[in-house]
Amino acid sequence: MFIYASSQYEWYKEYIEDILIYIKDSGGKIIPSFQMFRSHENKSYQEFYKTYKKIEAPDYHVIGTFEEGVQVLKKIKLPIIGKTVCGFASKGVVQINSVN
C-alpha cells in the first residue's frame, strides 16, 4: 500500500503519475485512488468523474478547441464562467459575456 500526495506543478505531477502507474501495474494499491489523483487540478477530468459517479453538479461543457468552444457558446445562455483545464488559485477563470 502506497500513500502519496499530488502536486500543483505540472512537471512534478507528471513524474508522480509515472510512479503511480508503475505501482498500479506492479499490483500495488495506492491511496488515494488514481481517479482522485487525476482529478487534482484537472477540471475536465473532475467533470467526467462526477458524471461517471452520478454526482450532481451544475451543467458543464468540456471543450477541446477554440472552434468547438465558439459553437458551444452560441447554443447556451451567457454569461457563463469559463475555466482552463489546468491551474489553481483561480488562474484561467474568466467570465464570458459574449461570443465576439
Image (tube, rainbow, N blue to C red):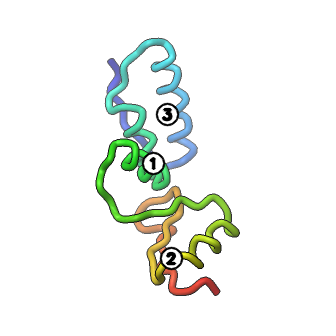
- What residue type is disc 2 on? Ile
Instruction: Judge left or right: residue 59 versus residue 72.
Output: left
Quadrant containing the C terminus in the rendered view: bottom right
Above or below 89: residue 98: below
Residue at the image point whose x is 51% and y is 81% from the top: 96
Residue at the image point whose x is 50% and y is 49% from the top: 9
Above or below 21: residue 94: below
In the rendered image, which residue does mark 3 sit on? 16
In the rendered image, which residue does mark 2 sit on? 76
Image coordinates of residue 27 in percent, x first then y, are 44, 12
Q: Nearer the viewer, mark 2 or mark 1?
A: 2
Q: How many marks?
A: 3
58 or 20, nearer to the observer: 58
Kindly report the distance in space between the C-alpha atoms of the residues bearing marks 1 and 3. Answer: 21 Å
66 or 15, nearer to the observer: 66
Kindly report the distance in space between the C-alpha atoms of the residues bearing marks 2 and 3. Answer: 38 Å
In the rendered image, which quarter is residue 18 located in?
top right
In the rendered image, which residue does mark 1 sit on? 48
